[in-house]
Image: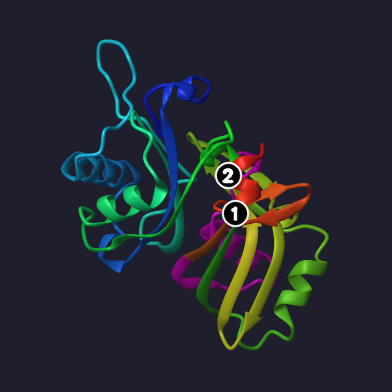
Amino acid sequence: MHAGLPVSEEVCAMSIIRIKFEKGPQVRFISHLDMMNSFQRAIRRAGLEAEYSHGFNPQMQMVFGAPLSLGYTSKAEYADLLFAQDYEALFVETELGKQLPPGLGITKSGKRLTKKNIMADIAFAEYEFSIKGLDDVDAPAKKIMSADALHVEKTRKNKTKVVDIRPMIKTIDINSKKCIVLVKAGNSGNLNPRLLAMALGKFFEREVEFRNICRISQYVERNGELTDPLSESALETV
């Protein structure tokens, strides 16, 4: 989600700093919009000179990755922050980090040179959670990955349709009631773990429940390989 001008007009910024941050249990029930507002207030308190849109109602320029569902925590959220000054990434990370509320903590940063913003660039997301309902199923991950299809009903804008989410799952590992799954995210499609739980319930003909869902990683794609959004190839090449 972004605030302000379209991506094509971001070139007016003197610097674009990409940050990686955590969303802890303290803030897992705040909305995506409220989180954006928290960052805007923190930038003002830090005295950083943000880039603003032009027009009747100027908006602070920032772009976040795919929104995180309410109730989820995360160790790997990303945002591109646009500034009217040529700041170094570490300076922004330090000063902004002092002003963020408990539960929102910056863990890494870098200067973004590519024109492609984080929302447009994210390709995959990795989640970790506890899983209930598959205790007595032999090799459930293998059965999931070998399935021809995983159908589930998806409702959007009061319209319900049946979709096959199997092509959206890249890897899945289920061990000792814990699950780690790597799925498509961003503009290429976005598989919410709650939808995956519904699909597995239908596939295994039982109730499947995911608990303590945490997004642990996100990736961009470069030359067919997945890489961290703060890697050199992600920040400097399209």
Q: Is residue 98 left or right of residue 227?
A: left
What's the residue at 57%, 51% (across, down)? Answer: 229
Q: Looking at the picture, tell me which residue is in the foreground, 65 or 17.
A: 17
Q: Position of residue 232 (x, y in %)?
A: 61, 50
Residue 238 seen in the figure = yes
Give the residue furthest to the top: 56
Q: Position of residue 192 (x, y in %)?
A: 54, 55
First to last magenta residue range: 187-214
Residue under pointer 2:
235
Q: Is residue 215 left or right of residue 120?
A: left
Q: 141 above or below 149?
A: below
**The N terminus appears in which quarter of the rendering?**
top left
Amino acid type, label 1? Ser
Q: Are marks 1 and 2 in contact (CB under 8 Å)?
A: yes
Residue under pointer 1:
231
Marks 1/2: CA–CA distance: 6 Å
Amino acid type, label 2? Leu
Helix, strand or loop for disc 2:
helix
